[in-house]
Image (cartoon, helix red, strand yellow):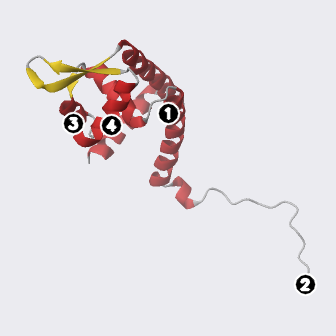
Amino acid sequence: MRAYAADPTPTRPGPLTYQASTWYLLAQAGSQARHLWSGVLAQLHVSPSQFKVLRALSESGPLGQHQLADLIAVDPRNAVPLIDSLAERGLLAREVDPADRRRRVLTLTARGQKIATDLASIGAEIENDFLSPLSTAEQQSLRRMLLSLLRA
């Protein structure tokens, strides 16, 4: 049997073709961004869906449950457990709409507003750090391109 000598300096191939493909690069960037963002949400004990509720109410002000569900693109039936979980934590309040007593209006409590503000601030910091290798013009271009892809 022939003996093969181990190559003392193994060479590693260069980047593989798929590693330069757009789909792969988008997936990798998204994975890194998701990892950073998940850490922040975990620290504040907020799920991604709860984040959407908190930020939507923070930006828009009081909303009805159906309006909120439409705004964050969630089925109204799936919005109820989200709303319940945030209400149980004292982050949002449900009040009877004076114009229609059958309707509930959702508002953030002071604690809910604080968390929503913290999420916005921390999110901006993470985004700035993550995108710091790009110039301001490149960041704006990336945002426009991503929006175009997602709207298509």
Q: Which residue is mark 4?
A: 81
Q: Nearer the viewer, residue 68 or 13?
A: 68
SS category of the residue bearing label 3: helix
Name the amino acid type tagged 1.
Answer: Trp
Labels in figure, total? 4
Picture residue at 43% right of the left edge, 35% below the top? 47
What is the three-letter code of the residue carrying label 4?
Pro
Q: Are marks 4 and 1 in contact (CB under 8 Å)?
A: no
Measuring 53% from the left and 53% from the top, which residue is drawn there?
A: 20
Q: Is residue 27 left or right of residue 97?
A: right
* Placement of 81 over or under 62, stated as above or below: below
Cα distance in 3D space between marks 1 and 2: 54 Å
Q: Position of residue 70 (x, y in %)?
A: 21, 36
Kind of residue sitting beneath label 2: Arg
C-alpha gap between disc 4 and disc 2 = 68 Å
**Residue 100, how many percent across, how many down?**
8, 23
The answer to whether mark 3 and mark 2 are in CB contact below 8 A is no
In this rendering, the answer to whether 77 lies above or below 137 is: below
Rendered image: mark on residue 2: 2
Q: Quadrant of residue 109?
A: top left
**Residue flagged by tag 3: what amino acid is it?**
Asp
Q: Nearer the viewer, mark 3 or mark 4?
A: 4
Which residue is label 1 attached to?
A: 37
Check disc 3 and report the residue beneath it.
Answer: 70
Q: Earlier in the sequence, mark 4 or mark 1?
A: 1
